[in-house]
Amino acid sequence: MTPANRLRALLAEGRLLTMPCCYDALSAKLIEQAGFDLTFMSGFAASASRIGQPDLGLMSYAEVQDQARNIADAIAIPLIADGDTGYGNAMNVRRTVAGMAKAGAAAVMIEDQLAPKRCGHTPGKDVVGREEAFDRIRAAVDAREEGADILILARTDARHTLGLSEAIDRAAGFAELGADILFVEAPKTEAEMRAICSELPLPNMANIVEGGETPDLPPAKLEDIGYRIAAYPLSLMAAAMQAMVETLDCLRRGTPRDEHLMSFSELRRRIGFDDYYAASERYASSRRD
């Protein structure tokens, strides 16, 4: 099946899909190796990893598409790509959606923030007017209908400045326009999360940021509320950064660092050295490498 069809099949199962988010090809491979069914390229984490900058709209469309292509090439599980605001007007949204499909993404997220966008759990964000928000999703759906084999994840950040009712109304409009998955960002209570899932018709995604605004509920609770995808955008990056900072501190102080490190043999295996060597046995010239 195509990546999009694999994602459609997962959503049709009707269960909660726990989705650790990646930021590069290696983190995506680790997610797949751990047995998860899908992943999401976190814009926050990808911006930090690729350009060492915060998620404030600094990465270009070409950089994001290239990052998505590298990730999709490394894994077999479906990848949802972060398309931000679509990188311009409605015509840019069409190009973004088509480009993410060509990069191998199973779905692309398009949101209604003002450009330049920012992380949904940081200060200063705002949204465009309703009609412009609808135009973005209309353009995304048009790109899909004209041949881009990809699902549309429609996101609204309206809860932050305009309230939950406006956010739900916008998401309902996205559904009517043909979006496949809905994402109301940053509800503040379990009651708000229940309202979202009870009032909106499509599969809904929860975004669980440790220390963020949305309650960090256990997966069983999220499934009971009605969510179909639970995204964890920063868990892996936060864990990796903590381990790196601790290891660097050990190196600076000259103290043992083994407890923070994966073994060299495990490192090689997970990156793919063992698979490479096994496959290369078929070719005499490769065996000399």
Image (cartoon, rainbow, N blue to C red):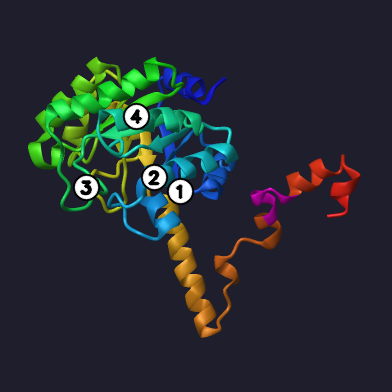
Q: Residues in magenta?
A: 268-273
Q: Secondary structure at mark 1?
A: loop
Separation (CA) of disc 1 from disc 2: 6 Å
- In this view, the residue farthest toward the bottom is 253
- In this view, the residue farthest toward the front is 91
* Residues tagged 4 and 1 counted as in contact (Cβ below 8 A): no
Q: Secondary structure at mark 3?
A: loop
Image x and y of residue 11, in percent: 42, 22
Horizontal side of residue 150 vs 266, given as left or right: left
Image x and y of residue 92, in percent: 31, 32
Residue corresponding to mark 1: 23
Q: Toward the viewer: 213 or 43?
A: 43
Residue corresponding to mark 2: 42
Q: Secondary structure at mark 2?
A: loop
Count the labels in the image: 4
* Residues tagged 1 and 2 counted as in contact (Cβ below 8 A): yes
Separation (CA) of disc 1 from disc 3: 22 Å
Q: Residue at x 91, y 45 (%)?
A: 284
Horizontal side of residue 56 vs 78, given as left or right: left
Q: Which mark is residue 223?
A: 4
Q: Nearer the viewer, mark 4 or mark 1?
A: 1
Res 82 seen here: yes
* Circle 3: residue type: Glu
Q: In terms of sequence position, does the residue under pointer 2 or pointer 3 come before the other? A: 2
Separation (CA) of disc 2 from disc 3: 17 Å
Separation (CA) of disc 3 from disc 4: 19 Å
Q: Toward the viewer: 154 or 144?
A: 144
Q: Nearer the viewer, mark 2 or mark 3?
A: 2
